[in-house]
Image: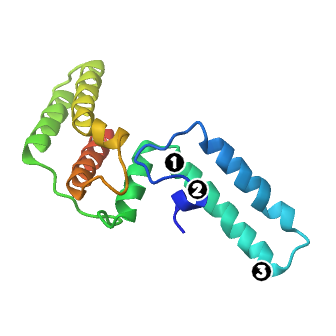
């Protein structure tokens, strides 16, 4: 069972956070290990697993980048610790940002340029992320989201 099935929500690249807390608390109310103190060891273990999965799912769904990574892994399009090759043009822009920092540019200026670049790369995938439909979104769109994910991760390290 994946996190989306666990929360009984559709697979999405941007989870609707308004109902997320409700789903989480409903699962915790039903399966929190404290409520199974007098149950059999098997029932206690099952409750612990379900509760633990709910905690992990909530943590994943609360962060858009984590949700994107989870969906890409779920779809078999990303592996843990994958070595992804970014476009040379993007790497050149990052190198320019690093040079700005090394040349003593104002931190605010570097931060502004980094945010501008993040905005540009997000704009290219925003419709895909916001309108993702598990059954109809083509793999080519998910590959664009994957590229965005790695670019953003790279920029976040600056």
Q: How many marks?
A: 3
How far apart in space, not on screen, are marks 2 and 3 (Cα)?
24 Å
Asked if residue 158 can be seen in this view, the reply is no
Mark 3 lies on a secondary structure that is helix
Q: Which of marks 2 and 1 is nearer the N terminus?
A: 2
Q: Give neighbour class at mark 1: few <14, some 14-19, many 20+ (Cα, 10 Å).
A: many
Q: Which residue is drawn at 40% across and 46% down?
A: 65
Q: Give neighbour class at mark 2: few <14, some 14-19, many 20+ (Cα, 10 Å).
A: few
Q: Which residue is drawn at 29% across and 52% down?
A: 137
Above or below, comparing residue 104 to residue 149 in the picture = above
The front one of 38 and 75 is 75
Q: Which residue is drawn at 30% across and 48% down?
A: 149
Left or right: residue 16 versus residue 33 is: left
Q: Quadrant of the C terminus?
A: top left
Above or below, comparing residue 106 to residue 35 in the picture = above
**What residue would you read off at disc 3?**
42
**What residue would you read off at disc 1?**
61
**What residue would you read off at disc 2?**
8
Q: Residue at x 74, y 68 (%)?
A: 47
Mark 1 lies on a secondary structure that is helix
Q: Quadrant of the N terminus?
A: bottom right
Q: Where is residue 51 in the image (x, y as percent from the top left)?
A: 69, 61
How far apart in space, not on screen, are marks 2 and 1 (Cα)?
13 Å
How far apart in space, not on screen, are marks 3 and 1 (Cα)?
28 Å
The colour scheme of the drawn protein is: rainbow
């Amino acid at each position: 069972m994946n996190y989306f099935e666990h929360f009984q929500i559709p697979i999405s690249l941007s989870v609707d956070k308004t109902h997320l807390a409700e789903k989480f608390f409903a699962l915790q109310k039903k399966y929190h290990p404290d409520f199974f103190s007098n149950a059999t060891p098997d029932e206690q273990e099952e409750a612990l697993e379900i509760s633990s999965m709910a905690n992990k799912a909530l943590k994943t769904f609360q962060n858009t980048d984590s949700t994107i990574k989870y969906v890409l892994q779920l779809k078999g399009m990303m592996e843990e610790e994958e070595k992804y090759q970014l476009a040379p043009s993007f790497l050149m822009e990052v190198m320019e940002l690093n040079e700005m920092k090394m040349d003593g540019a104002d931190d605010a200026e570097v931060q502004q340029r980094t945010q501008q670049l993040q905005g540009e790369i997000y704009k290219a995938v925003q419709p895909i992320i916001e309108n993702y439909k598990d059954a109809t979104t083509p793999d080519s769109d998910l590959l664009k989201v994957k590229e965005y994910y790695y670019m953003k991760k790279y920029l976040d390290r600056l």
